[in-house]
Amino acid sequence: MAKENSDTHVLTANRLTDGIVVFWNEEQKWVEQINEADTATDPEWIGYLKKVGEVAEARNIIVEPYLVAVSRNEGVIEPLHIREKFRTLGPSVRSDLGKQAAAVSDERLLIAAE
Amino acid sequence: MYIYDQFDREFVLERVAQLRDQVRRRLTGELNEEEFRPLRLQNGVYLQLHAYMLRVAIPYGTLSSKQMRALADISETYDKGYGHFTTRQNIQFNWPALSDIPEILEKLADVEMHAIQTSGNCIRNVTSDPYAGVASDEYEDPRIFAEFIRQWSTLHPEFAFLPRKFKIAITGAAEDRAAIAFHDIGLRLKPNDLGEIGFEVHVGGGMGRTPMIGQVIKPWLAKSEILDYLQAVMRVYNLHGRRDNKYKARIKILAHELGLEKLSEEVDAEHRKIGVQGSSERQIIDLKEIDRIAEYFASPDLDTQSATLTDKSVGLNDPDYLLWKLINLTEHRHPDYAIVNISLKPYGGIPGDASADEMRTVADIAEQFSLSEIRVAHTQNLVLPYVRKADLPALWRALKASGLETPNKGQVSDIIACPGLDYCGLATARSIPIAQAISNRFKENGLEREIGKVKIKISGCINACGHHHAGHIGILGLEKNGQEYYQITLGGEDADGAAIGKIIGPGFSFAQVPMVVEDILKTYLDNRERGEEFIDTLRRVGVNAFKEDIYADH
């Protein structure tokens, strides 16, 4: 798949109960891995994701929802901003912690970490 | 050490029960995030980059072995098996679930600890000299007054919603080891011309985006007046401090805008008002109360301590032991004792992090060798305040067995670094890996010993939690076009002769920083005169001499 431009977004937030970073996916669930996130490029879909975040926050499922600009290449979804990259992976100084630790078998995530 | 009385115990447990109910209401949706945020913040609960973070207060940096073990247990049971000691004598847990936090606070309350006022716009954890009570240059033990201030400021109804956070540091020694000039209020116990001990009061210091050195607002204040005077300062700040702009809300801005003279007049007027005879607001501390609190901090009878085992198998001539002794010990006021600094900066390690196992090891060692007492320094290291010199070889061996014997106090690799973009939601760049890279570079090039004392401090954003403004070499991480870059400052100082470092020029990439630091320190080696430390050479030859070398090479 060709690399998409920065108009591509995913919806992210922190789970209310434990604060863990989550992403909204196509199956209408909050998941922990960005590669499972629903990506949106057209403004209407982006608007829909925004609404999803607001509703989920109002229902006290997540906190602080927002959209993250990403690139999508060969099935790998990677945030464009450095802050979001670390948020997606975990502390760069502790590869045994965060999502990078939970998904060591996920090659796509490892590619993003490189 | 201070021991909770019945009031303290009930108060802390009541607070835990309140937060338990607040968390329950948040999880069931009775409270939304906007309503819950100020409640969680006043109990030290942040939402950070990866998860919630709980900041636990270590009042004036004093911990018992029992408390350290409790922190280790909490880190294993509710977190990821480690904690991070901060630049304000707190410990942070980076991964607790919100639903577990009431239980964590209960465990903390069991060992007389809490997380109250470790965040929010209130008076924060009072910090102090990590060598309080044992330093050879001390006029009077600051912990007694730190405890008064802790009791007075905890949930003080008038100061629960200040314009902005408020930090107080207190020292009682000739050498400032508590960075008092960089606090909203800095207090130094010292004698006046008559030899009476009182407070020199500094106001309006701080780091952040507008760094300022505190100014002396009261050259000498009787000890019994301290709470009245603090009340007066807080009241003037609470009234005039700006609430329309959080970046201009700290007392340093008020002191700057009003001017010290006017601020001082207002504070004195308020102080007089509070001090009117018979005023119900008077907080004056009577001597009996000072004596009562002082008893908790009374020095143990060190001369009669029974000798602990001395390990004869470690010869006094072991070069590693001798180096550690040379670098990591500080003079104790008792000639047969030493203050032992335990570095939490192993080469290539994360400054201030301690695993549960390391915390337990330190607790055991403190129990065996330091009357079960540990101190936490704002430099993100630990201190054992009561070690018999005869026990040093055995103590060193115990530290060595756990990798806690790094001999680098005050050296290049003893770097202060905030959590930065690896953990912090506010950060713009990483701090920790920069510290690691510098530490590793100087381990490899072998220059650390030759260079000697230097303070390197790294912040991952302009909020300056890594105290970069006060570093001899300060490193500030910023972000531009999605890339981290680092501004270097030179000439900062957090101790006596406090100074704010000056930016030397355009910033550097992540990869360049360790090389630039090496160039700076090589310039020092080239220019130093006999016996001169880095900061002295820098002050003598000026920043420009360093700049030329740095920018010629990069």
Image: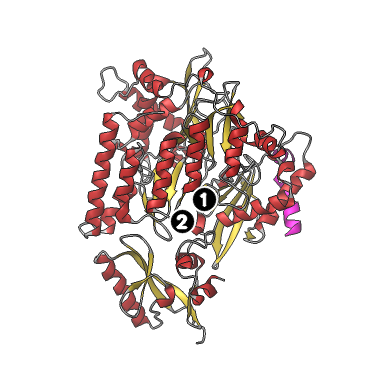
- Name the residue type under label 1: Cys
Please give the residue where the numbered disc 1 appears in the rendered image. Answer: B418
| Chain for numbered disc 2 | B
Tell which residue pokes out farthest to the front in this image: B313
Q: Are marks 2 and 1 in contact (CB under 8 Å)?
A: yes
Q: Do tags 2 and 1 sit on the same chain? A: yes
Q: Earlier in the sequence, mark 2 or mark 1?
A: 1
* B100 vs B498, nearest the viewer: B100
Residue B420's place in the image compared with B89, above or below, is below
Residue drawn 61% across the image and 32% down it: B311
**How many residues crowd mark 1 within 10 Å: few (<14), some (14–19), many (20+)?**
many
Residue B424 numbered mark, or none: 2
Q: Which residues are magenta?
A: B537-554
On the rendered structure, is B513 left or right of B352? right
Q: What is the quadrant of the C terminus of chain A in the image?
A: bottom right
Q: Looking at the picture, how far across and down is residue B5, in whole percent?
A: 30, 28
Q: CA distance from mark 2 to mark 1?
A: 9 Å
Residue B205 in view (yes/no): no
The answer to whether residue A75 is above or below residue B126 is: below
Height in image: A28 above or below B462? below
Q: Amino acid at mark 2?
A: Cys
Residue at 44% in and 79% down: A8
